[in-house]
Image (spheres, grey):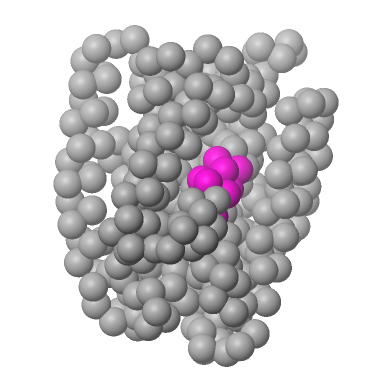
Amino acid sequence: MSKKNIDLVANEFDKTGNRTLINADAKRPNPKNPYQKEEMLKQRLLTAIILIPAILWVLTLSTQILAIVTSIFIILGAWEWAGFCGWRSKITRSFYACVVALTLVVAYSLLHSPSVIYMLVAACLWWLLALYWLLKYQQKGQATIPTSPLFKGLLGFLILLPAWMALLVLHSDERYGWQWVIFVLVLIWAADSGAYFVGKRWGQKKLADKISPGKTWEGVAGALLLSSIVSLSYALFQSMSLKSLIFFLLLCLLTVIASIVGDLLESLFKRKMGLKDSGQILPGHGGILDRIDSLTSAVPIFVVGLLISNH
């Protein structure tokens, strides 16, 4: 089978659990169909209108409530990640999601422990390894990522848990609080929006065509530009000193670059499994992982940078 045909094929399982092959394009909406584009846009806008105010409201509540609400997204993300591991049965995926949920309970008990910073630093080092995998795959087109379902299951913990912990650490820290959580979310959303619109309008040079053909270097420039505007605006609002301003802007740039790594890593795992989206739980947006992939890598790096700068 040619590489072109392989890209057109998605792995599915029938009701008996046997693997079947189907044409992936038959399941995907046609991006050139104006009616499908309009319908998808309506779904995306409706989902955003409902979710964004709810998320902003939850962020103003206690860290404990935030932990409970965000843990739901992490557990749903774990369910989807189990699919990346090749676990298709509901029992196996539910078991994996339950193990992740129990780990969240243990992790929350360590929220105010001095060792939490070391956990987040370790997570940042993990993303360096992920970057290495992406570069090797793009350069050689070889599957340098692990194929063992168990190993990929362990990777799910490294991807989901540190981001959740970092978000709670930032929210509970009296020096920062919910306002800074909103900032980092807006920062990544701005980067995603800048990448999407600039890439769609001017995108020519592919960023990583073997991993995610739709992403371009022009889109990266758009992400960095719009996120820099957001960062500078927030820095001026906070009346930062020149030294703090420079460090803050550099940290935000690093955070946005990390968000791109997280996005590409999820795209790589989806490509290896022949999937377009991680799930269909969010109308017009795909799955939970499709919405938080950038945050999983960006938030730990942003929080570690802030904590280090204040020690």
User: For the point 54% across and 58% down, which residue is it?
Assistant: 247
The magenta stretch spans residue 254: yes
Picture coordinates of residue 253 (x, y %)?
A: 53, 46
User: For the point 35% across and 75% down, which residue is it?
Assistant: 177
Picture coordinates of residue 282 (x, y %)?
A: 32, 45
Quadrant that contains the N terminus = top right
Question: For this view, does 85 lie left or right of residue 25?
Answer: right
The magenta stretch spans residue 125: no
Question: For this view, does 144 lie left or right of residue 217?
Answer: right
Specify the principal SS of the magenta part: helix
**What stretch of residues is rendered in magenta?**
251-261
Q: Is residue 255 visible?
A: no
Q: Is residue 109 above or below residue 305?
A: below
Residue closer to the observer: 60 or 83: 60
Residue extending farthest to the front is 242
In the picture, residue 126 is in which quadrant? bottom right
Picture coordinates of residue 133 (x, y %)?
A: 76, 42
Count the marks. 0
Residue closer to the observer: 35 or 188: 188
